């Protein structure tokens, strides 16, 4: 095997990988579309299996815009869920007065010392 055959093999492997990436992306999009009927999905799958390259091109031409819209909507939903999770995990972001009041309750119950309360108060006011 010479260098030209090696490069040709790499190019073929690249196109095979690229083909399967697009195919799985299309199949994933097809099943994430809740507006398409079961028969429509079945026909698209059969078309993709029987004539793969033509099926991919036709799918991208016919349903490419909807594929993009579904992808953007899914990304926005994931970002919103992530923002909600971060806000929930980081705390409610309560105002400093509420944090100091909670610290005062902990101080009076004996859960924290005066020094810890002062540090909490300084952090809340910062």
Image: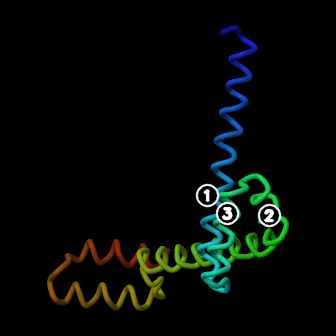
Q: Which corner quadrant of the image does residue 14 belong to? A: top right
Pointer 3: what residue? Answer: 26
Q: Tell me the element at label 3.
A: helix
Residue 112 in percent (x, y) is at: 20, 77
Residue 89 in percent (x, y) is at: 41, 75
**Distance Cα–Cα, label 1 vs label 2:** 13 Å
N-terminal label among 3 and 2: 3
Q: Farthest residue toward the right?
A: 61
Residue plotted at (39% across, 85% down): 99
**Distance Cα–Cα, label 3 vs label 1:** 5 Å
**Distance Cα–Cα, label 3 vs label 2:** 8 Å
Pointer 1: what residue? Answer: 24
Residues at discs 1 and 2 in contact (Cβ within 8 Å): no
The image's mark for residue 122 is: none
Few, some or many residues within 10 Å of mark 1 (<14, 14–19, 20+): few
Residues at discs 3 and 1 in contact (Cβ within 8 Å): yes
Q: Tell me the element at label 1.
A: helix
Q: Which corner quadrant of the image does residue 64 belong to? A: bottom right
Residues at discs 3 and 2 in contact (Cβ within 8 Å): yes
Few, some or many residues within 10 Å of mark 3 (<14, 14–19, 20+): many
Residue plotted at (68% across, 57% down): 50
Q: In this view, does 116 lie above or below 52?
A: below
Q: Which corner quadrant of the image does residue 97 belong to? A: bottom left
Residue plotted at (76% across, 14% down): 4
Q: In this view, does 34 lie above or below 56?
A: below
Few, some or many residues within 10 Å of mark 2 (<14, 14–19, 20+): some
Pointer 2: what residue? Answer: 60
Residue 83 in percent (x, y) is at: 55, 76
């Amino acid at each position: 095997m010479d260098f030209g055959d090696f490069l040709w093999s790499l190019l073929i492997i690249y196109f095979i990988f690229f083909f399967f990436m697009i195919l799985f992306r299309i199949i994933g999009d097809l099943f994430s579309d809740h507006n398409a009927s079961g028969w429509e999905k079945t026909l698209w799958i059969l078309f993709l299996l029987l004539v793969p390259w033509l099926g991919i091109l036709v799918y991208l031409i016919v349903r490419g815009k909807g594929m993009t819209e579904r992808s953007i909507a899914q990304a926005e939903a994931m970002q919103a869920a992530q923002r909600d999770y971060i806000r929930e995990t980081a705390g409610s972001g309560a105002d400093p007065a509420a944090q100091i009041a909670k610290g005062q309750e902990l101080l009076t119950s004996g859960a924290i010392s005066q020094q810890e309360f002062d540090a909490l108060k300084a952090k809340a006011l910062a």
